[in-house]
Amino acid sequence: MEITYSSKKVFKNSALSVLYKGIGMVLSLISAPLILNCLGEEKYGVWVSLLSIVSWIYYLDLGIGNGLRIRLSESLAEKKKEQAEKYISVSYAILSTISFVAFIVVAFFLKIIDLKSILNIHGEINENINLIFAVAILFVCINFVFSLVNNIFYAVQNASAVSALTIIGQAIYILGLLLYSKTGSGTILVIATIEGISQFLKNIIGSIWAYVKYPECRIKIEKPDMQYSQGILSFGLQTFISNIAALILNSTDNIIILRYLGADVVTPYSFCYKYFAMISTVFAVIVVPLQSAYTMAYTNNNIKWIIKNLKRAMMILTVFSVGTVMAGIIFRPFTVIWLQKKLHFSNKLIVYTALYCILLMVSHTFSTLTSGIGRIKETTIASVVQAFINIPVSIFFAVNLGMGVEGVILGSVIAIAISAIVGPIVSYDELRKIKEKQSDKNRE
């Protein structure tokens, strides 16, 4: 099957992705109160905090996932099938090694530390937090490797398949939660196991799907050609740094709240963040198909196509920003219907979280372009700076100034604003340089 890029193909993928994401959002709305009812507010706060830590493993791929997406897109654009297969094989080999080492290291530290004390978990939480963490990490390490199939789907211009697989995983998860809710046990360990198994089954289905539909992207069971690792890592290491920075920015708020404000405070913050994150996630689903298409267009020197679709992305950004404001207005009555109970959400928490969502979408719009064309040096630096300031600023606002949970999200707003400013500047500078080069060639 010949892999090509076009506005029509991007639109089709975006439309399908939005449809699938809409279904996924409904499933997410169903699963959240199910977990809350199974665990209660305090255990739920502990679980989402542990889950945010566990997800760190996905950021330890040295940027191999993004590196594979870029190199595979280039290979397919140039119709180099053998090169594409070698990039895939070496990516799976490296990720398998990283996954194994990561689990061994985490298992070692879990032998010598007490997570319950470190995270300041008290109250009625009488479960073995170290065991829960170990089980969650085991599943994450396994899925860490198999989820590489998502990057293959992105590279072959079938981003909607990733959203479809997410629905499958969520459906399996909800089925497991429904069955477990009948027992009335309410243990975090079982919830962690159900979540891990659902993700594993989803990735297996995705791997079989990709193997059958895209023969040019099949992994060969042979000794990987490690010379191709350089092509992936040269780009991937920069994205790895950006991913680690994003990890610190996006995953530490729950930990800060848990550590300094208590597990019960995590729950309202978590639901507020989840609510607005659904908007930014749908937006990301729409623009994500553009990244590999930008790569192919850039490889073929099609600057007009890049500019036209960047303008379209900015129009969509405007619509979603207005939608975020409207979502903030209806937030409280919606959560009462959604959760079937009334939690306390301050006005500032709602406003700051909505603002964070808007700035995150601005960042997504331009990072999709800069990553697609390989101009990520400046955005990587911006990501590192915002990660560096996020924790101390959030703690300062929350603890020293007594702003509580609102101070935590305000610190994140200030941090993400850096990428939201740098991204557009770098994008327009790169487009200007490309235009100048083309003008010089035309004059010659």
Image (cartoon, helix red, strand yellow):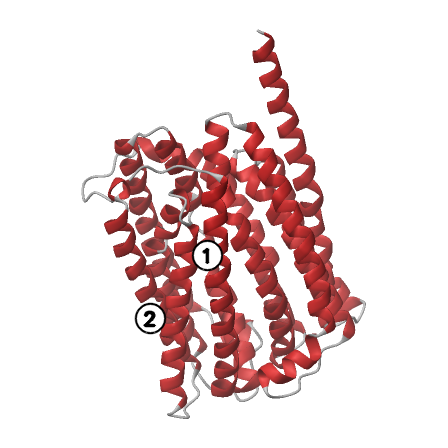
Residue 367: image location, x then y, percent: 58, 43
Q: At 36% across and 46% down in the image, what residue appears?
A: 152
* Mark 2 surroundings within 10 Å by alpha-carbon count, few (fewer than 14), some (14 through 19), many (20 or more): some
Badge number at residue 197? 2
Disc 1/disc 2 C-alpha distance (Å): 26 Å
Residue 237 in view of the camera? no
Quarter-of-image position of residue 142: bottom left
Badge number at residue 362? none
Tag in front: 1 or 2: 1
* Mark 1 surroundings within 10 Å by alpha-carbon count, few (fewer than 14), some (14 through 19), many (20 or more): many
Residue 196: image location, x then y, percent: 37, 69
Residue 275: image location, x then y, percent: 61, 70
Quarter-of-image position of residue 436: top right
Instruction: Report helix, strand or loop for mark 1.
Output: helix
Eyeballing the image, is 433 above or below 255? above
* Front-lying residue, 6 or 420: 6
Amino acid carrying mark 1 in the image: Leu
Instruction: Report helix, strand or loop for mark 2.
Output: helix
Residue 205: image location, x then y, percent: 29, 61
Q: Which residue is mark 1?
A: 16
Q: Quadrant of the C terminus?
A: top right
Amino acid carrying mark 2 in the image: Ile
Find the residue positioned furthest to the top. Answer: 444
Find the residue positioned furthest to the right. Answer: 401
Eyeballing the image, is 118 above or below 371? below
